[in-house]
Image (cartoon, grey):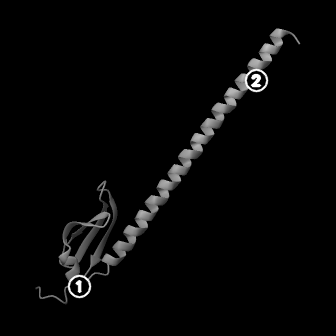
């Protein structure tokens, strides 16, 4: 084998190793980002489950409890807004304290039969 062919073969091996290294780094980076995205999705899902459980508890509150909580107030890691657009309907919204993004919203019916209103 001549010296020129030996140098060319060595150069080809170095180029191939560089391509493999770049591909390996890209694969590693992609895997790392996928793992981070999965972790963030799981955290977000946990937040939503917790907020849903809290909203389930709020939906069991009496009319008096809902009236006491009218307005916006901090509630654990969230902010809760309770409004009463009609005499019998309450709207409850749970928002993220950090971003103020709404997480969950529901409407709750409470009969007027137990109060002295016309």
Q: Nearer the viewer, residue 20 or 81?
A: 20
Foreground mark, 2 or 1?
2
Q: Position of residue 91 (x, y in %)?
A: 26, 70
Would you identify the image quadrant in which residue 107 lies? bottom left
The mark that comes first in sequence, 2 or 1, is 2
Question: Residue 33's x, y, as percent?
Answer: 53, 45
Q: Is residue 32 above or below residue 95?
A: above
Which label belongs to residue 13?
2
Of 17 and 89, nearer the camera is: 17
Residue at the spot 31% in from the left edge and 53% down from the top edge: 99
Write down the residue under mark 1: 111
Q: What SS does tag 2 mark? A: helix
Q: State whether residue 5 is above or below residue 83.
A: above
45 and 111: which one is in front? Answer: 45
Q: CA distance from mark 2 to mark 1?
A: 80 Å
- How many neighbours does mark 2 have within 10 angstroms: few (below 14), some (14-19), or many (20 or more)? few
């Amino acid at each position: 084998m001549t010296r020129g062919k030996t140098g060319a073969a060595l150069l080809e091996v170095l180029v191939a190793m560089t391509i493999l290294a770049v591909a390996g780094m890209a694969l590693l980076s992609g895997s790392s980002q996928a793992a981070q995205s999965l972790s963030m999705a799981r955290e977000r899902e946990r937040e939503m489950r917790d907020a849903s459980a809290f909203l389930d508890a709020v939906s069991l509150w009496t009319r008096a409890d809902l009236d006491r909580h009218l307005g916006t107030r901090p509630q654990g890691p969230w902010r809760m807004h309770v409004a009463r657009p009609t005499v019998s309907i309450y709207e409850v919204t749970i928002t993220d304290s950090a971003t103020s993004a709404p997480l969950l919203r529901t409407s709750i019916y409470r009969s007027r039969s137990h109060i002295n209103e016309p």
